[in-house]
Amino acid sequence: MDEFRQRLNNLREQMETAGIDIAIIQFFIDIYYFSGSNQLSTLIVSRDDDPTLFVQVGIDVARENSWIRDIRALEGMNSLRDFLSVGRNGNVTFGINEDTVSGTLYRKYRESFPAAKFVNISPVIQKIRSIKSDKEVNLIEKTAEVSSLGHAHVREVLKPGLTELDLTAAVEHALRRNGHSGCSITRRGGYALPAGPMAPSGPNLGVISGNGAITMTGTGLSPALPMGASQRKMNSGDMVAVDVSTHVNGYHSDEARMYIIGQPDEQQENAFEVIFNAYQAAIDAIRPGVKSREVYYAAADVIEQAGYLDYFAAFSRYPKYSYLGHGVGLEAIEFPLIDPRDETVLQPNMVIAIEPKLIAPHWGCTLEDTILVTDDGYRFLTKTKRALIVV
């Protein structure tokens, strides 16, 4: 309970700084972070009163899980309108999850409170969440242990003739048996990510498709969901990128390794060497006080000097989307984004994933770890061997 109260106090302090009187929180992960319950609900937090959780479905479970005392049934917009109107004038400033709330619901709020001001509270919450407690770090590290089991299973099953789908299904099964929830949660709505790790192989390593992420998405099973594992059979000499996003007890880890079936050729060895050197330069730059973009450029400089800049996250094809990594926690991809424009200053107990990628036509290479920013540098939370893994 003390940790939840501290989170709430942090939110109230930031609300005061931002001039927000009342937070109307409707993104389910943010609700869980502050309330301890993940039921279909709306969380109301004011700067002066105790929080109130309005639950649409699962109120008994919410009362069992949450530390919040004032938990009420939500019966449509009228419940919120009546509650938010009592004893308040029209000049209130509401903070709302503008990045996740539907346009229809946002319009209803504006119609219900025409004199009120609405601001986006999501950046405030994301910054609060980016600094993990020791308990959260421990949970992420336990998730990373499960991720390591998934990667260990890759070495057991990967062989010529196996399809990408066979591989991802086998790894997913190993992860689920050890506590992985089977999902990867992100703030971005409207797109269903395929189950299992990403495991593009051979020429599929150069494919970018699907939901707009500049990463090795694979081709998927059909144009209806054109990312993830395909029915391609892997052959001797193929490199395979196994990107495992694991989710245990609410927290993620993110870990990618390159595997090769048989011995690598000169181009494959060189590509991995470039990625590894860029990766090492990036993590060596991680310490409190460093800006996210400085970590990005540490990797980019290595890749440019090696002559691979056009392929750095497919830079020549998608230059405006360049990035190196992201925060990790209750969401698989969260604040901060490690890219050339991000001015976020790294702080102790931030957890970030560093994942330099070379994505070229018909081939690609990557390496990714989840990393804790410490008082004087960094510490790996993911543990799988950092090498081109030969099977």
Image: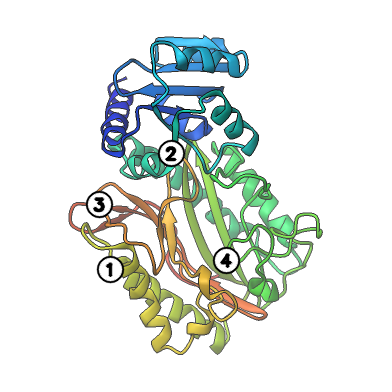
Dots 2, 1 in contact, CB < 8 A: no
Measured Cα–Cα span from mark 1 to mark 3: 15 Å
Residue 132 shows which numbered tag? none
Which residue is labeled 2 in the image? 119
Relative to 375, 4 lies left or right? right
From this viewpoint, is residue 266 visible?
A: yes
Closer to the observer: label 2 or label 3?
Answer: 2
Chain-order first, disc 2 or disc 3? 2
Chain-order first, disc 2 or disc 4? 2
Q: Amino acid at mark 4?
A: Ile
Chain-order first, disc 1 or disc 3? 1
The structure residue drawn at horizontal position 51% and vertical position 64%, both measured from the top left corner, is 257
Which residue is labeled 4 in the image? 214
Closer to the observer: label 1 or label 3?
Answer: 3
Disc 3 element? loop
Which residue is labeled 3 in the image? 347
Residue 284 shows which numbered tag? 1
Up/down of 64 relative to 124, above or below: above
Disc 4 element? loop
Chain-order first, disc 3 or disc 4? 4
Relative to 229, 132 lies left or right? left
The structure residue drawn at horizontal position 42% and vertical position 74%, both measured from the top left corner, is 276
Disc 2 element? strand
Where in the figure is residue 177, as x and y percent of width and height? 59, 38
Chain-order first, disc 1 or disc 4? 4
Relative to 190, 43 lies left or right? left
Q: Nearer the viewer, residue 46 or 93?
A: 93
